[in-house]
Amino acid sequence: MIPIGINVKGFCMSEEKPERLPLRERVFNAASTLFYEEGILGVGVDAIAKAAGTTKMGLYRQFESKDVLITEWVAHQVTQYRAVLDELAKRWPDEPRRQLLGFAQFIADDVERSSHRGCSFINTIAELPDDAHAARKLIEEHKAHQLERLAALCRACGFARPESTAIHLTLILEGAQAVAQNRSVPHLGHHLMALTEDILTARVS
């Protein structure tokens, strides 16, 4: 078990009481929770404003539109995911295999405690059919960047086919996040780690 200690759902992690937080932070935290639990299309600005203890006008003073709020929510999650890989690199700078296993463990832990809502990135892509939406673009860029970081770690491991290995790892990690939503596989995190170990062992040059 490799504890990372980062919440990727974007919920409020502040120890302050919600009413003491700045309005912008209250709005963002309320939107983050509602977007994840009820879906971005199922939540209106009225509901967000009410949950944040403000008015619709108060919300719009902080975020000019719901689309801006959605995009900032996605950007916040992207930052958190990248922070996981950054933290692993700091802990084990000369151990790329351990970094790969650490990232897989982070995903395994996340899918084990995930609700039926599953991965917010998957949900957001599904709910935003416009491929030009800024939030979709952020997710696409994030996934491409994450794949390259995994490939770089695979190259550092000396694997014969590092790019292919990174793709295979991405497929099982993304697949596990999708399966978590339908809860069809018991002990999903355990199976994810076992498969990750198998891939990394098989790709040693």
Image (cartoon, rainbow, N blue to C red):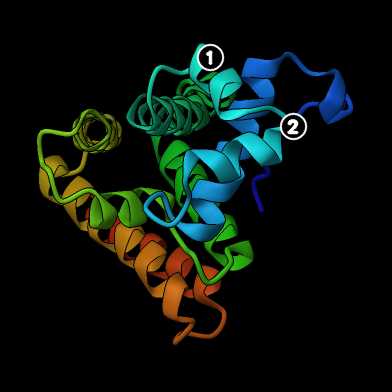
Q: Is 148 on the left-hand or right-hand side of 3?
A: left
Which residue: 49% across, 53% down? 107
What's the residue at 24%, 38% (across, down)?
A: 143
Q: Quadrant location of the N terminus?
A: bottom right
Graded by Cα atoms within 10 Å as few (under 14), some (14 to 19) or many (20 or more), the crowding at tag 1 reads some
Mark 2 residue element: loop
Across and down, in percent, residue 166 comes to 21, 46
Q: Nearer the viewer, residue 147 or 68?
A: 68
Mark carried by residue 62: 1
**Visible residue check, residue 140:** yes
Closest to the observer, 152 or 139: 139
Q: Which residue is mark 2?
A: 53
Seen at 40% across and 62% down, the residue is 177
Of the two numbered discs 2 and 1 on the same chain, state the one appearing first in sequence. Answer: 2
Residue 150 percent across, percent down from the top left: 28, 37
CA gap, disc 2 and disc 1: 13 Å
Whether residues under marks 2 and 1 lie with C-beta atoms below 8 angstroms apart, the answer is no
For label 1, the SS is helix
Q: Is residue 82 left or right of residue 111?
A: left
